[in-house]
Image: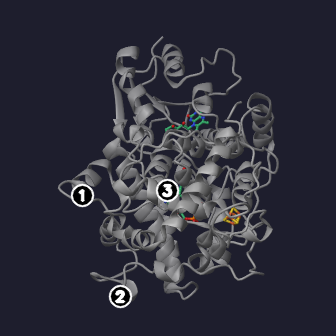
């Protein structure tokens, strides 16, 4: 029996009908393969909501393709004979379908690209890996941009992307005369802020089945399945886009850095899940944001701030990932080795800020950027946590986490383990910053105003101790000149009190259980 012409292998974060591997698809000759496999669900212990989101979105995508006439071989996790890995499922499919060739769009993760390199030999048929055209900047283009630069900086890359797309440009000049309106985007919370609630997608029969499966098979992973509300189709994701544009974009910029207890979403878009798996086209989204600005519906600081996150940060971190992998994963500039405390997986800590962010994460598989950077990330940085452990935690717990985007954000931006390849300074802060940008300190057992000793906010002493401990590496950093100057002016007795308080706190921390203990 003769087989199919091309077998197009589509991964769980490639759910876009315009995918490069689907170009030229002939329903009479070609087939699509999609597989749910234990290897992907467990290489880190993903949050159950993340697994349910991906499986349900994959099943809906396969169905949508079939409705359009594509022939799809879909292997569910519980299907008889499911071998559990991409490579073995592809081998099984090749036996069934006898393809002349395999086509796949380049994966988001280096780990998977390494797997793919072995497929031609394992299958004995040509395997074509196509560029992922859903990104604005290809891997080669980024490498060209980076070549010869002493330092990579997002801001300069972002300006190139503005010029390339023409987004918020007036000829060669940026709209409003400035490239970046971040200075207007740091308003602290003022209390009683009204945030419109984001939409919730109703659970259909497919999602219900997936939730039962995930509840059964991944009950021991950190995170709650309760209250699942993610969109799982492109049409549903479009409703989330429309809702964001109509109700939250206007105040997105102004409120972007605020953290409010009981309000995990603020005016954030909650679109990263859908963009990252391919249900939303990021550039089309930016064009709609630009239009909302030109129509006078939203201010420039919100429109520019949002567009910068997508064509700036999102594209930039992907470029950094592919430029430096696999070495990037091993970087540990600050030689940090402490285990992450078990409360990262339970939320059981008396530090109210950490408790709020970790319980939000457990419940929603989501926390917004400042929560990730300035609470859980900042604490891990200050205690000197092993960056690989921190990376695994972020990759596990957020539904939008795929290594290409998560790793540079965690290891680079948040932990400074790359020594400044991605960003210019570590994001370290004491209690005063958290108190200014959140309402967490009000119900904390620690006193944010107290610097050292019993009852003092641990972030205060940890902050100075971090700077002191890492002075040899960080003191020469221009962006830290002011804080090191303050440290230099401080009385020795005060410095000793900070060191002592930090040492006592870290000793207590080390006595707490580690994950799995
Ligand atoms: P919004 O605040 O509404 O921002 C709009 C969009 O901009 C996001 O949907 C996202 O696509 C993009 N974006 C914003 N900031 C970044 C950024 N720094 N890098 C890349 N894209 C960005 N983002 C992920 O998509 N996946 C991750 O695994 C991830 N891990 C992170 C880990 C750490 C330690 C930190 C500090 C940040 C991480 N981010 C990650 C970036 C950012 O926190 C999330 O993109 C954002 O919180 C998603 O929520 P949102 O859709 O409501 O974003
Ligand atoms: C994250 C994830 C999970 C949990 N499960 C699957 C799966 O069963 N099948 C699949 O095709 N993709 C899954 N994914 C997404 C992949 O891990 C992702 O496509 C690769 O890491 C490349 O980015
Ligand atoms: Fe966090 Fe310190 Fe504020 Fe408590 S007092 S919430 S530990 S910053």
Q: Position of residue 363 (x, y in %)?
A: 76, 51
Residue 106 shows up from this direction = no
Residue 145, numbered circle: 1
Q: Which residue is mark 2?
A: 177
Q: Position of residue 207 (x, y in %)?
A: 76, 42
User: For residue 125, what is the image quadrant?
Assistant: top left
Give the SS element for disc 3: helix
Q: Is residue 312 above or below residue 133?
A: below
Q: Which residue is mark 3?
A: 466
Residue 499, numbered circle: none
- Quadrant including the C terminus: top right
Distance between the alpha carbons at the discs numbered 3 and 1? 34 Å
Distance between the alpha carbons at the discs numbered 3 and 2? 39 Å
Q: Position of residue 233 (x, y in %)?
A: 65, 51
Colouring scheme applied when the structure was drawn? one colour
User: For residue 355, what is the image quadrant?
Assistant: bottom right
């Amino acid at each position: 029996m003769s087989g199919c012409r091309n077998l197009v292998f589509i991964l769980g974060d490639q759910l876009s009908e315009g995918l490069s591997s689907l170009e030229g698809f002939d329903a009479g000759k070609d087939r699509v393969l999609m597989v749910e496999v234990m290897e992907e669900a467990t290489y880190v212990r993903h949050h159950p909501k993340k697994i349910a989101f991906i499986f349900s979105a994959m099943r809906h995508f396969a169905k949508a393709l079939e409705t359009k006439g594509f022939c799809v071989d879909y292997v569910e996790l519980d299907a008889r004979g499911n071998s559990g890995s991409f490579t073995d499922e592809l081998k099984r499919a090749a036996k069934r379908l006898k393809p002349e060739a395999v086509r796949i769009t380049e994966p988001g993760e280096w780990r998977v690209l390494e797997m793919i390199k072995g497929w031609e030999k394992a299958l004995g048929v040509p395997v074509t890996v196509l560029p992922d055209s859903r990104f604005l900047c290809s891997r080669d283009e980024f490498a060209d941009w980076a070549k010869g630069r002493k330092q990579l900086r997002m801001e300069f890359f972002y300006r190139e992307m503005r010029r390339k797309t023409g987004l918020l440009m007036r000829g060669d000049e940026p709209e409003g005369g400035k490239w970046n309106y971040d200075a207007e985007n740091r308003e602290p919370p003022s209390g009683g802020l009204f945030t419109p609630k984001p939409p919730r997608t109703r659970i259909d029969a497919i999602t219900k089945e997936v939730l039962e499966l995930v509840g059964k098979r991944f009950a021991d992973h950190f995170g709650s399945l309760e209250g699942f509300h993610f969109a799982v189709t492109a049409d549903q994701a479009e409703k989330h886009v429309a809702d964001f544009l109509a109700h939250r974009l206007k105040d997105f910029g102004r409120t972007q850095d605020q953290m409010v207890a009981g309000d995990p979403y603020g005016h954030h878009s909650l679109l990263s899940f859908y963009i990252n798996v391919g249900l939303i086209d990021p550039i089309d989204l930016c064009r709609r944001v630009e239009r909302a600005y030109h129509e006078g519906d939203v201010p420039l600081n919100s429109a520019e701030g949002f567009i910068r996150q997508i064509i700036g940060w999102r594209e930039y971190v992907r470029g950094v990932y592919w430029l430096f992998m696999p070495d990037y994963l091993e970087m540990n500039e600050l030689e940090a080795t402490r285990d992450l405390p078990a409360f990262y997986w339970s939320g059981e800590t008396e530090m109210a800020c950490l408790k709020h962010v970790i319980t939000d994460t457990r419940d929603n598989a989501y926390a917004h950027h400042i929560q990730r950077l300035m609470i859980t990330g900042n604490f891990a940085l200050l205690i000197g946590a092993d960056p690989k452990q921190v990376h695994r935690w972020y990759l596990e717990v957020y539904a939008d986490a795929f290594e290409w985007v998560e790793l540079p954000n965690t290891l680079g931006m948040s932990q400074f383990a790359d020594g400044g390849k991605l960003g210019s300074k570590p994001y370290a802060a004491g209690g005063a910053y958290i108190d200014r940008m959140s309402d967490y300190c009000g119900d904390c057992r620690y006193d944010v105003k107290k610097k050292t000793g019993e009852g003092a906010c641990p972030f205060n002493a940890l902050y100075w101790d971090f700077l002191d401990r890492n002075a040899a590496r960080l003191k020469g950093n221009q962006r830290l000149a002011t804080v090191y100057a303050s440290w230099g002016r401080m009385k020795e007795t005060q410095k000793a009190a900070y060191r002592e308080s930090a040492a006592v706190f870290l000793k207590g921390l080390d006595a707490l259980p580690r994950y799995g203990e």
